[in-house]
Image: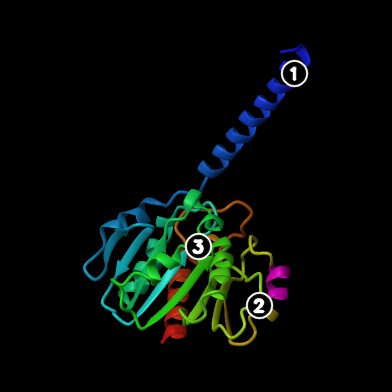
Amino acid sequence: MNKKLKIALGIILALVIVIAGSALWYVNDYYHAEPSATALLEGDENVTVTQIDNGLLLDGPGNDSALIFYPGAKIEYTSYLPLFMDLADDGVDCFIVEMPYNLAIFGMDSADEIVNDNAYDYQKWYICGHSLGGVMASYYSLNHTDDLDGLILLAAYPADDLGNMSVLSIYGSNDKTLNKETYDESKSLMDYNLTEYVIEGGNHAQFGSYGNQSGDGAASISAENQRKQTKNEILEFIN
């Protein structure tokens, strides 16, 4: 092997190591659920939390409606337990999907495994997502309009026309992570049957329980308040 070839191979190997290391760092650098959220893995007197193949089932007193949730990018899926435990307690069973590498872009079709499972016999199915999870949930809904009764976006927007899909869009007025210009432009993609709700004083991160998010605005209301308003709007949309 000549000297030039050895140098070239050495450079290529170094680049591979750098790229692999950067990728490993990226997927392992994520927002972790707060202890108050992970404590809910034990469930409570009204809601049973069960580990399923691709996430969690929050089984409450309701039997008719179910919601499948896609987490935001690089956010631990258990961070959303406080919001969806409350929703399950009020009659809508919830599935929180654990995405590969905490990135919904690698698990866009994760809802298939749940919707197609004969163990579940719900009359209505809804899909929901936060931030990037909402974008991926919107993509999923495009190809499964016959399976779903509605799409719920939390600080998110679709990337394609949603046709006649019923959509609930919720975001906080203090959200600095959501690209508001792009969001406003996307309204034409979901204007057939759009319900929009702005949480005054809410921000991007308080839909989950994972602490402050880089680049986000400061909330002027509590996380509990933001989750309560979110839950109430989802219930109204479903019922």
Q: Can you see residue 154?
A: no
Neighbour tally class for label 3: few under 14, some 14-19, many 20 plus, Cα within 10 Å: many
Question: Which residue in the structure is indicated by mark 2?
Answer: 161
Quarter holding residue 84: bottom left
Circle 2 sits in a helix, a strand or a loop, which is it?
loop
Identify the mark at residue 5; answer none if there is no mark.
1
Query: Which residue lies at the image location 57% right of the left edge and 71% below the top edge?
Result: 138
Pointer 1 local density, CA inside 10 Å: few below 14, some 14–19, many at least 20: few
Q: Which mark is nearer the camera, 1 or 3? A: 1
Earlier residue among tags 1 and 3 = 1
Find the distance from the CA under tag 2 to the CA under tag 1. Answer: 51 Å
Residue 205 spot, x, y in % from top left:
53, 60
**Pair 2/3: label in front:** 2
Does 80 appear in magenta? no
Q: Amino acid at mark 1?
A: Leu
Q: Amino acid at mark 2?
A: Asp
| Quarter where residue 87 is shown | bottom left
Distance Cα–Cα, label 2 vs label 3: 28 Å
Percent position of residue 117, x then y: 34, 69
The numbered mark at residue 206 is 3
Asked if residue 184 lies in the magenta stretch, the reply is: yes
Q: Between disc 2 and disc 3, whose residue precedes?
A: 2
Q: Which residues are the magenta region?
A: 180-186
Residue at 64% from the left image edge and 54% from the top image edge:
215
Q: CA distance from mark 1 to mark 3?
A: 54 Å
46 relative to 30 in the view: left or right? left
